[in-house]
Image (cartoon, rainbow, N blue to C red):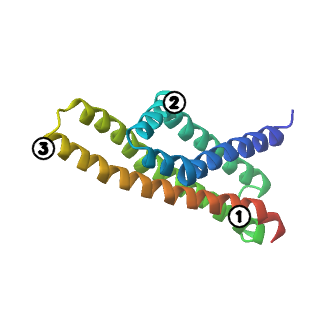
């Protein structure tokens, strides 16, 4: 089988999964879980337990790596003339926004949300009182940070998908 077919298949299918999962989470899952209170936290905890927060970065990394290799092959080794074309610029912009989204997701969003899960569980084990209130205040602050990072990544991936979809038609 032609390596370009394999690379393109992996890039597109895994990219759809990555972007779709992030957009679904930002637009529907996270707001619904937040509105559901403790029950929403349990749902998010089950997602983490099922490996969602581990699988997603791996999928994202494979998407990025296959995208870089596809661009290298299509551009003739990142030929400046091709890279400066409308297609080259559009695909580069899409790739850049994906990479920035990946970095924010791995460096900020994922660790913050994992910490929220751990601290939430610890707070539920703490008797009601000032110590628990302090733990829940930290959880709220971290949750806001994680939600902001999630939304930023979702916007970046929306830009990525949009530029990839229209690049050939510019």
Q: Can residue 58 be seen in this snapshot?
A: yes
Q: CA distance from mark 1 to mark 2?
A: 30 Å
Dot placed on the residue nearer the N-terminal end, 1 or 3: 3
Q: Residues within 10 Å of mark 3 (few under 14, many from 20)?
A: few
Report the disc number at residue 122. none
* Residue hosting label 1: 163
Where does residue 86 sit, x and y in percent of width and height?
Answer: 76, 71
Q: Earlier in the sequence, mark 1 or mark 2?
A: 2
Contact, mark 1 vs mark 3 (Cβ under 8 Å): no
Mark 1 residue crowding within 10 angstroms, few (<14) / some (14–19) / many (20+): many
Asked which quadrant contains residue 128, the reply is top left
The mark tally for this picture is 3
Dot 2 surroundings within 10 Å: few (below 14), some, or many (20 or more)?
A: few
Q: Nearer the viewer, residue 168 or 139?
A: 139
Who is closer to the viewer here, 107 or 35?
35
Q: Left or right of 118: which side holds 130?
A: left
Residue at 63% across, 60% down: 158
The residue mark sitting in front, 1 or 3, is: 3
Q: Where's the N terminus, which quadrant?
A: top right
- Residue at 70% x, 68% y is 89
Image check: 50 left or right of 120?
A: right
Q: Position of residue 91 (x, y in %)?
A: 71, 62
Q: Is residue 170 above or below residue 143?
A: below
Residue nearest the observer in this picture, 36 or 10: 36
Q: Residue at x 18, y 46 (%)?
A: 134
Can you identify the residue that label 2 sits on?
Answer: 51
Q: Disc 2 on helix, strand or loop?
A: loop
Residue that mark 3 sits on: 130
The tag earlier along the polypeptide, 3 or 2, is: 2
CA distance separating discs 1 and 3: 50 Å
Q: Secondary structure at mark 1?
A: helix
Q: Is residue 12 above or below residue 126?
A: below
């Amino acid at each position: 089988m032609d390596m370009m077919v394999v690379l393109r298949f992996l890039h597109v299918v895994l990219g759809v999964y990555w972007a779709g999962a992030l957009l679904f989470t930002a637009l529907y899952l996270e707001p619904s879980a937040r509105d559901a209170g403790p029950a929403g936290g349990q749902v998010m905890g089950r997602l983490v337990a099922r490996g969602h927060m581990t699988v997603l970065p791996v999928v994202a990394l494979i998407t990025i790596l296959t995208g870089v290799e596809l661009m290298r092959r299509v551009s003739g080794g990142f030929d400046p003339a091709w890279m400066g074309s409308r297609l080259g610029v559009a695909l580069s912009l899409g790739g850049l926004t994906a990479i920035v989204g990946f970095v924010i997701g791995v460096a900020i969003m994922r660790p913050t949300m994992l910490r929220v899960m751990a601290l939430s569980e610890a707070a539920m084990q703490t008797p009601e009182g000032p110590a628990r209130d302090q733990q829940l205040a930290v959880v709220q602050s971290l949750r806001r940070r994680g939600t902001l990072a999630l939304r930023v990544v979702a916007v970046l991936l929306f830009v990525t998908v949009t530029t990839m979809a229209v690049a050939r038609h510019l």
